[in-house]
Image: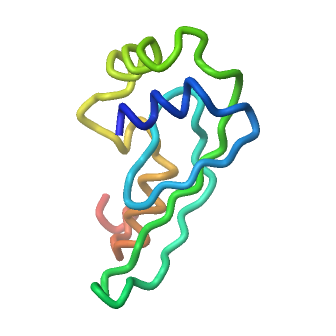
Amino acid sequence: MPELSATLAATLPAGSVAVTTDKWLVGDRFSFLDLLVVDGTEATDEPINVFLWSVQGAPHKGGQAAALEDINARWMGEDACADDPDACAALMSALGFDLEEEL
């Protein structure tokens, strides 16, 4: 999701709430608020994971391209859970995993 994250980081005003389904936003401007699990559609019985994100601070001054460069350099590591442990714990719980038991 680096492209979407960069676009939102460059355009959304502080105080906005972003909503994604089954995807995480990355970057300094996004703070995980909550995960809602919604019943699937008629086409699938799979639940839909809805992430709520609070947008912090001013839009990225360098625009989308500069925001994407920053996100790729700082937020696209191999361990998404380390970047946002609260979002990770919420998702793992929604999927039926107990992180305490796994450790």
- Taking the spot 43% from the left edge, 68% from the top edge, the residue there is 49
Quadrant housing residue 71: top left
Instruction: Say above or below: 95 vs 85.
Output: below
Quadrant housing residue 55: top right
Instruction: Say above or below: 32 vs 29.
Output: below
Looking at this view, name the residue that lies furthest to the left: 78
Residue 41: horizontal and vertical position, in percent?
A: 38, 85
Image quarter in which the N terminus is found: top left
Nearer the observer, 84 or 67: 67
Looking at this view, name the residue that lies furthest to the right: 15
Nearer the observer, 71 or 80: 71
Please indicate whether residue 11 sits to the left or right of residue 21 in the image.
Answer: right
Numbered marks: total: 0
Instruction: Say above or below: 88 vs 83.
Output: below
Residue 30: horizontal and vertical position, in percent?
A: 57, 37
- Taking the spot 39% from the left edge, 20% from the top edge, the residue there is 68
Image quarter in which the C terminus is found: bottom left
Nearer the observer, 48 or 65: 65
Residue 91: horizontal and vertical position, in percent?
A: 41, 62
Residue 23: horizontal and vertical position, in percent?
A: 38, 52
- Taking the spot 58% from the left edge, 17% from the top edge, the residue there is 60
- Taking the spot 31% from the left edge, 81% from the top edge, the residue there is 46
Quadrant housing residue 73: top left
What color scheme is it?
A: rainbow
